[in-house]
Image (cartoon, rainbow, N blue to C red):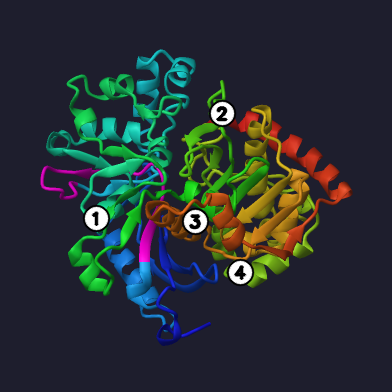
C-alpha cells in the first residue's frame, strides 16, 4: 500500500458510499490496483414502535455520510485531489418527503416499516387486485414499497402531505445533498411500486390512485440512465472535503443493485444472497422477469438491465436477538451453532420478528416450534436461528427457480456470510455451492465501481462493467462451501416441515 505522497499523479480514486439501516459505510477504490484502499463507517439510530413504525431522520444519513467520507479521505493512502467520482448506494423503498425549499418535512419511512399495510391493501384493491397490479407495473404493491408510504402520509399527516413538493428515495436524497440535482435512476425507482419496470417510466395509474389531482407526478425526480452522472459535487461539499472541482456523482442505486455490482453479479448464472439485517436473493437478467404470483420483485438493475429479486425481512435480526438473549458474542454464537446437529435438535424457527415480505405476511410474528425438555438448549437455539432464516431464503430461491432462474453459484454477502457454519448451512439448504467475494462491503464497493464506470464512460473510454468487476471483485476460495448430499437431503425434509408449519401459523396472523 503506497502513501498519498508516493501515488502517481494518474492514480484515479473512486468513493463508494452505502447508506444502510444500521449505518453508513464508505470505501475508496484505487483504479490502478483495483483494490479498496480505505474504509470508514458511522452508525444510524432507528425510530420504531410496536405498530410497525420504522423511520430515520435523513439528517443522520448526511452526518454519517460526512463522517464516513472524512474517515476515508484522512487515510494515509488517499489523496482527496485524486478522487474522480462518487457513487451512492442506499436502503431501498424509503420515503424522503421534501417541501418547496428542499427541506425534509418529516422522518423518512423505511423499507422495514409495516405501518402502511392497510394502505398497500387498499391500493391493490383499487387497481383491480394483485393480478391487475402485476400486469400494470410488473410488481405487486408490497407493504415495504414506497407507494403505500405516500398514501399513509396523505391519510395520516395531511398537513405534511400538503407541503410535499419532492419525493426522494434514500440514495437519491444523498445524491441531492452532494450535487443539488433532483434526479434518480431506474433500479431504485423500480422498488417504489409506482414505476413500470417494463417501460421504465413512472406509473400515472398508480400515482392517481394515491392522489387524483396529478400532484405526485410533479413531485418525482428526473430519471437518468445507469451510466449517466447525476451531476458534479457541489462546490461547498468539494471544499469541505478537499476534493477537486470536477468530481462527479454517478446515478447510484439501491443497496441490492449496488451489491450485485459489488459481487460481480452482472452476467447470467450468478446469484447473490445477502445475509444482512434483512435477506435478499437476486440475479442478473437481460429481460424483465415478472412473477405472475407477485412474490419476486421484478426490479431494474443499476447497470441498465434487470435484477429479479426476492426479499425476506429477518436474517441477522434473528441471530442478533438470539445472541442478545443468551448474552454471548458472535464467536460463541457460531461455536454453539456448529456443535448442534442438523435440524437443531427438532427446533424450527419461523423468523418473522419484523413481519415478513416473502411470503407476504406483514403482520406475522416469530414462532419457535418443536421444543422439548431435552432440546431446549443454547446450541439448538443458535442453530435454529441460522436454519430458520436460511429456510426463508430457500423459499426465495424456489420462487426464482419457478421463474426460470437456476443458479450455478451463490455469492454470499452481508454480516452473516462471515460465519463458516452459516455458509455451510446455506450450501446444504440451497443444494448449491457458495462463495464470498474478498470485499465485505459489497454495496459500497459496487457504488464505487459504478462511479468508475460512469467516469470512464464520460471520458470516452470503452470499458464494460463486467471488465471492471472482473478486475475489482476477486472471490475468496477459502470461503467456499459445497453441499453435502446427506445433509442436503435431511434439510430438504426439514424444509418441507418448515413450509407446513408456515401454512398452519398463517391462520394466527
Expressed as whole percent of the image width and height from the top left, the position of residue 273 reads 61, 49
Q: Which residue does the numbered mark 1 point to in the structure image?
A: 179
- The stretch of residues the image draws in magenta is 84-105
Between marks 1 and 4, how big is the CA–CA gap?
A: 40 Å
Which residue is nearer to you in this view: 331 or 424? 424
Q: Earlier in the sequence, mark 1 or mark 2?
A: 1
Between marks 2 and 4, how big is the CA–CA gap?
A: 38 Å
Q: Tell whether position 91 is magenta.
A: yes
Q: Name the residue: 40% across, 77% down.
A: 9
Up-down: is 128 above or below 436?
above
Mark 3 crowdedness (10 Å alpha carbons): few <14, some 14-19, many ≥20: many
Say which mark, if any, is on residue 446.
3
Mark 2 crowdedness (10 Å alpha carbons): few <14, some 14-19, many ≥20: many
Q: Name the residue: 62% across, 37% down.
A: 396
Q: Name the residue: 36% across, 38% down.
A: 115
Decide if residue 285 is in sight here: yes
Q: Residue furthest right?
A: 486
Which residue is nearer to you in this view: 437 or 109? 437
Mark 1 crowdedness (10 Å alpha carbons): few <14, some 14-19, many ≥20: many
Expressed as whole percent of the image width and height from the top left, the position of residue 210 reads 27, 24
Q: Which residue does the numbered mark 2 point to in the structure image?
A: 289
Circle 2 sits in a helix, a strand or a loop, which is it? loop
Circle 1 sits in a helix, a strand or a loop, which is it? helix
Front: mark 2 or 4: 2
Q: Earlier in the sequence, mark 1 or mark 3?
A: 1
Mark 1 in CB contact with mark 3 (< 8 angstroms): no
What is the quadrant of residue 198 in the picture? top left
Q: Which residue does the numbered mark 4 point to in the structure image?
A: 330
Between marks 1 and 3, how big is the CA–CA gap?
A: 20 Å
Expressed as whole percent of the image width and height from the top left, the position of residue 197 reads 44, 29
Amino acid at each position: 500500500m503506497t502513501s498519498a505522497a508516493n501515488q502517481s499523479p494518474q492514480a484515479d480514486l473512486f468513493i463508494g458510499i452505502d447508506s444502510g439501516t444500521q449505518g453508513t459505510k464508505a470505501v475508496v477504490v484505487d483504479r490502478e490496483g483495483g483494490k479498496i484502499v480505505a474504509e470508514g463507517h458511522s452508525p444510524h439510530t432507528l425510530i420504531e414502535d410496536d405498530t410497525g413504525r420504522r423511520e430515520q431522520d435523513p439528517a443522520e444519513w448526511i452526518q454519517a455520510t460526512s463522517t464516513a467520507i472524512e474517515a476515508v479521505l484522512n487515510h494515509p493512502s488517499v489523496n482527496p485531489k485524486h478522487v474522480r467520482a462518487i457513487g451512492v448506494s442506499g436502503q431501498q423503498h424509503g420515503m424522503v418527503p421534501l417541501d418547496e425549499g428542499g427541506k425534509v418535512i418529516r422522518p423518512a419511512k423505511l423499507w422495514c416499516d409495516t405501518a402502511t399495510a392497510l394502505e398497500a391493501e387498499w391500493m391493490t384493491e383499487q387497481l383491480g387486485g394483485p393480478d391487475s397490479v402485476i400486469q400494470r407495473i410488473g410488481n405487486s404493491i408490497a407493504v415495504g414499497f414506497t407507494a403505500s408510504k405516500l398514501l399513509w402520509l396523505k391519510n395520516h399527516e395531511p398537513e405534511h402531505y400538503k407541503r410535499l413538493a419532492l419525493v426522494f428515495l434514500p440514495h437519491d436524497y444523498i445524491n441531492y445533498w452532494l450535487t443539488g440535482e433532483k434526479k434518480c435512476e431506474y433500479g431504485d425507482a423500480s422498488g417504489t411500486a409506482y414505476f413500470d419496470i417494463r417501460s421504465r417510466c413512472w406509473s400515472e395509474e398508480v400515482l392517481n390512485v394515491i392522489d387524483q389531482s396529478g400532484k405526485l407526478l410533479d413531485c418525482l425526480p428526473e430519471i437518468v440512465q445507469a451510466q449517466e452522472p447525476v451531476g458534479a459535487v457541489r462546490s461547498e461539499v468539494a471544499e469541505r472535503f478537499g476534493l477537486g472541482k470536477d468530481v462527479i456523482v454517478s446515478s447510484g442505486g439501491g443497496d441490492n443493485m449496488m451489491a450485485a455490482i459489488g459481487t460481480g453479479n452482472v452476467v447470467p448464472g450468478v446469484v447473490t444472497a445477502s445475509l444482512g439485517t434483512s435477506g435478499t436473493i437476486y440475479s442478473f437478467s437481460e429481460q424483465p422477469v415478472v412473477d405472475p404470483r407477485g412474490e419476486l420483485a421484478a426490479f431494474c438493475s443499476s447497470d441498465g438491465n434487470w435484477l429479479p429479486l426476492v426479499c425476506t425481512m429477518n436474517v441477522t435480526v434473528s441471530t442478533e436477538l438470539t445472541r442478545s438473549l443468551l448474552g454471548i458474542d458472535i464467536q460463541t454464537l457460531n461455536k454453539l451453532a456448529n456443535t448442534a446437529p442438523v435440524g437443531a435438535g427438532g427446533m424450527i424457527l419461523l423468523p418473522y420478528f419484523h413481519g415478513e415480505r416473502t411470503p407476504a405476511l406483514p403482520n406475522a410474528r416469530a414462532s419457535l416450534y418443536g421444543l422439548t425438555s431435552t432440546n431446549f438448549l443454547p446450541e439448538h437455539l443458535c442453530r435454529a436461528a441460522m436454519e430458520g432464516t436460511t429456510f426463508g431464503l430457500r423459499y426465495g430461491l424456489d420462487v426464482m427457480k419457478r421463474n426460470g432462474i437456476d443458479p450455478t453459484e451463490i455469492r454470499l454477502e452481508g454480516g452473516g456470510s462471515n460465519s463458516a457454519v452459516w455458509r455451510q448451512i446455506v450450501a446444504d439448504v440451497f443444494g448449491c455451492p457458495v462463495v464470498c467475494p474478498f470485499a465485505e462491503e459489497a454495496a459500497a464497493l459496487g457504488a464505487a465501481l459504478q462511479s468508475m464506470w460512469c467516469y470512464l464512460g464520460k471520458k470516452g473510454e470503452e470499458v464494460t462493467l463486467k471488465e471492471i468487476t472482473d478486475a475489482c471483485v476477486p472471490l475468496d476460495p477459502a470461503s467456499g462451501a459445497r453441499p453435502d448430499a446427506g445433509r442436503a437431503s435431511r434439510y430438504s425434509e426439514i424444509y418441507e416441515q418448515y413450509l407446513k408449519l408456515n401454512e398452519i401459523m398463517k391462520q394466527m396472523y
